[in-house]
Image (cartoon, grey):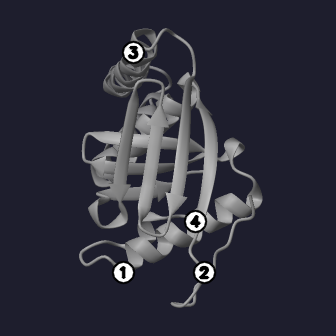
Amino acid sequence: MAVQATSAPDHEPLSFEIAAEVRYGDALAAALSQCWRRAPTALTVYLAGLVALIAAGFLSGGALAWLAVVGAVPGVAAVAFAAATARLDFKRGGGRPLRMHYHVCDSGVEIRAARRSDWIAWDDLWAASETRRSFLLSPSPGEQYVIPKRCCDAGRADALRELLGRVLASREGRRSGDLQA
């Protein structure tokens, strides 16, 4: 299917399918990305503090190296929690990668999986972002769908990026900068 996408207001309707296999690594990377997007200041302060503790341990000749270990514990615990939560979700689904089908069009996206179907109108989209590996669509603060880029050819990835950029830029109170190239 050819992907048709233009930025002109009188463009032909955009419509394309993406068949995706969402793996555990995709879900974990998406969860960690969502944490970073929601609390960048807190995570930056934590990482700066951790670097300071590592530097203190190094500058003290190793006498204060234990501070870096103690400082790393909350970060390791948070990543372990995200990993365990993603793993639990996958075990509930039979432990296999999730096969998802996304039908993207000008008015929204239809998401189909084995036992579930969802429709998200672009006006109802809470957030969207792009990471190096995926597109992330969040219909609500606690829910997100992952579209791995490896499942999109270049035309579909570009069309989705353009569409999400337009949607986010046109929304009041949203930053179009949420979508990173």
Measured Cα–Cα span from mark 2 to mark 1: 19 Å
Q: Looking at numbered disc 3 in the image, what kind of residue is underneath it?
A: Ala
Q: Looking at numbered disc 2 in the image, what kind of residue is underneath it?
A: Glu
Circle 3 — which element? helix
Horizontal relation, residue 43 to residue 177: left or right: left
Residue 84 - label = 3
Residue 151 in view? yes
Of residues 70 and 37, which is closer to you in this image? 37
Residue 161 - label = 4
Q: Tell me which numbered mark, 3 or 1, is placed earlier along the sequence.
A: 3
Circle 1 sits on which residue?
170
| Of marks 2 and 3, the one in the foreground | 2
Q: Tell me which numbered mark, 2 or 3, is placed earlier along the sequence.
A: 2
Other-residue count near label 4 (Cα within 10 Å), few / some / many at <14 / 14–19 / ≥20: some
The residue depicted at 42 percent of the width and 51 percent of the height is: 137
Circle 2 sits on which residue?
12
Whether 60 is drawn above or below 85: the answer is below
Q: Tell me which numbered mark, 1 or 4, is placed earlier along the sequence.
A: 4
Other-residue count near label 2 (Cα within 10 Å), few / some / many at <14 / 14–19 / ≥20: few
Measured Cα–Cα span from mark 1 to mark 4: 14 Å
Measured Cα–Cα span from mark 2 to mark 4: 17 Å
Quadrant location, the N terminus: bottom right
Of residues 92 and 82, which is closer to you in this image? 92
| Of marks 2 and 4, the one in the foreground | 2
Measured Cα–Cα span from mark 2 to mark 3: 44 Å
Where is residue 174 shown, x and y percent of the image? Answer: 30, 72
Circle 4 — which element? helix
Where is residue 55 shown, x and y percent of the image? Answer: 46, 37
Circle 1 — which element? helix
Horizontal relation, residue 92 to residue 25: left or right: left
Q: Looking at numbered disc 1 in the image, what kind of residue is underneath it?
A: Ser
Q: Looking at numbered disc 4 in the image, what kind of residue is underneath it?
A: Arg
